[in-house]
Image: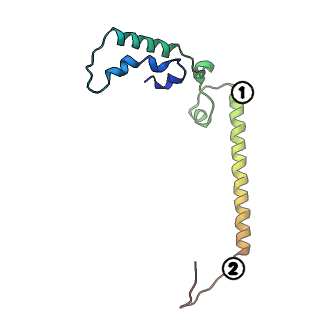
Amino acid sequence: MTGYYRRFIKDYAKLPLPLVQLKQKDSVFQWGEEQQKSFAALKQAVTQVSTGHIPFYLTHGYHPLCPATLHLGAAVNEAAHSMATKVQAAIKLTKEHIKRAQKRQKMYADRKRRDVEFEEGDRFRY
């Protein structure tokens, strides 16, 4: 469970060693003082480590604004709301541009298209 924090804790490999030895094949599971010290040191290291990443909700008091949170009606501030509406407008404009480009491509292909008639017994290649 503490594997995520291994890159943030100095000398992490040494801390859980007595606990890892409990899981080895052909070893008797015996919880002693050494394992308790290892567990306590590991617990302290994990709870005091700073990953540099603070959850958004804890720092700002609300969930980040995205289409999902807008749909759910999450409490947001005005700056985040205006940013999200601008992004949504840009996405809508981009979709419209793509649709227009697809129509132009179809019109071009339709101009080049010619009717082909086949008669019984004709051979053709794909």
User: Which residue position is annotated with label 2?
Assistant: 114
Q: Where is residue 84 in the image (x, y as percent from the top left)?
A: 68, 34
- Marks 1/2 in contact by CB < 8 Å: the verdict is no
* Left or right of residue 21, residue 122 in this image: right
Relative height, residue 119 to residue 89 (above, below): below
Q: How far apart are marks 1 and 2 (CA)?
A: 55 Å
- Relative height, residue 59 to residue 109 (above, below): above
Q: What residue type is labelled 1?
A: Ala
Check the picture and name the quadrant holding the C terminus.
bottom right
Dot 2: few (<14), some (14–19), or many (≥20) neighbours within 10 Å?
A: few
Question: With respect to residue 79, does 42 lie above or below?
Answer: above
Q: Residue at x 73, y 53 (%)?
A: 97
The quarter of the displayed image where residue 35 is located: top left
Instruction: Inspect the image, locate mark 2, and give the three-letter code of the amino acid beneath it.
Output: Arg
Residue found at x 45% / y 18%: 14
Q: In the image, 30: left or right of 89?
A: left
Point 32% across, 20% down: residue: 22
The picture places residue 6, in percent across and down from the top left corner, at 50, 23
- Please tell me how many numbered marks the rendered image carries: 2
**Left or right: where 12 falls relative to 68:** left
